[in-house]
Amino acid sequence: MLSLSEMAVDVLTTSDGREKTARSRRHAADWFAAREAGESPEIGRAVPPMQPSRPARPELLDPRQMPKRKPGTPQGRIAMLHAVAHIELNAVDLHWDIIARFADIPMPVGYYDDWVKAADEESKHFNLMCDCLEDVGSHYGALPAHAGMWRAAEDTAEDFMGRLAVVPMVLEARGLDVTPGMIALFTKAGDAQAVAALETIYAEEVHHVAYGSKWFHFLCGRHEMDPKLAFHDLVGRYFHSSLKPPFNEEKRAEAGLPPDFYWPLT
């Protein structure tokens, strides 16, 4: 059996989206089968690439070059599904990357359980979005996509707490803010498949934000740091934008993010 870090690098170096997520789900199944058998598989060491392998399409554009589409039109809804698929594929890589990138830092086995589970769920989310796109005659790669999403991973490649602060606690928390509006839009359009997929994503993303908050607080305790002050410092250092309301305060609280963490950063 591969070490967990080797599994992570296997996913990160696979370019095709469907194949990447198939490997991700297979490795997650192997990890949890071993855990249920009472084993703690080896975490190991493997060097993750600075950039994960990606398919030739979609074309990646600077966020300012991304075409604007009206969300109320069929083309606008396809663009929205495509954007979510792209986010989910990035999330698969981000969750495997945090496992391999910081494997030299001793962490409880529950930490690895959480991120393997998150990577498995993000893989499912990507496939759900691809199914929705294919159902309306499109596919992942048919439209351009946002090139800036991996920047947070590059910026925090040597800062474990910075990675936890920016990726799950800022970027994924943003998903909790915007997904209810997307669900309403697809409900109005009568697209039951997209609504069901987005509701699955919405329910499971709360856990991913919660994993970030839990392990960020764990490391703050280890280093005797004030979590709120550390969070503000790290987000100020690595997040190249301001946080924008409205916030889904209920779901953020459920994920362990109180308002005094994010409101001061607006």
Image: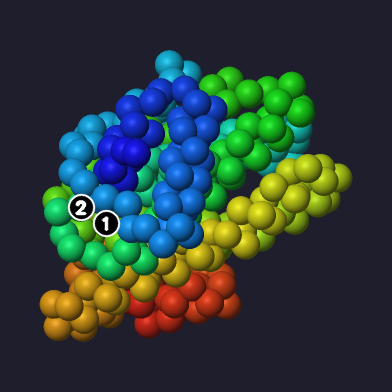
Q: Which residue is mark 2?
A: 102
State how many labels appear: 2
Circle nearer the N terminus (2, 1): 2
Q: What's under tag 1, amino acid-wise? A: Arg
Above or below, comparing residue 218 to residue 57 in the picture: below
Which quadrant does the C terminus fall into? bottom left
Above or below, comparing residue 134 to residue 252 in the picture: above
> Viewer-proximal residue, 40 or 161?
40
Q: Which residue is mark 1?
A: 163
Which residue is depicted at the point 37% across and 82% down?
Answer: 260
Q: What's under tag 2, amino acid-wise? A: Phe
**Residue 185 placement (x, y as % from top left):** 74, 50
> Viewer-proximal residue, 194 or 101?
101
Q: Is residue 106 left or right of residue 173?
A: left
How many neighbours does mark 2 have within 10 angstroms: few (below 14), some (14-19), or many (20 or more)? some
**Residue 189 placement (x, y as % from top left):** 82, 44
How many neighbours does mark 1 have within 10 angstroms: few (below 14), some (14-19), or many (20 or more)? many
Q: Is residue 83 left or right of residue 222?
A: right
Query: CB under 8 Å between callouts 2 and 1?
Result: yes
* Secondary structure category for the residue under label 2: loop
Above or below, comparing residue 266 to residue 138 in the picture: below
**Residue 69 placement (x, y as % from top left):** 62, 34
Q: Marks 2/1: CA distance?
A: 10 Å
Q: What's the coloring here?
A: rainbow
Residue farthest to the right?
190
Q: Is residue 113 left or right of residue 77?
A: left
Above or below, comparing residue 160 to residue 25 in the picture: below
Which residue is depicted at the point 13% across and 77% down?
Answer: 223
Q: Is residue 171 left or right of residue 68?
A: left
- The image quarter containing residue 142 is top right
Residue farthest to the top?
56
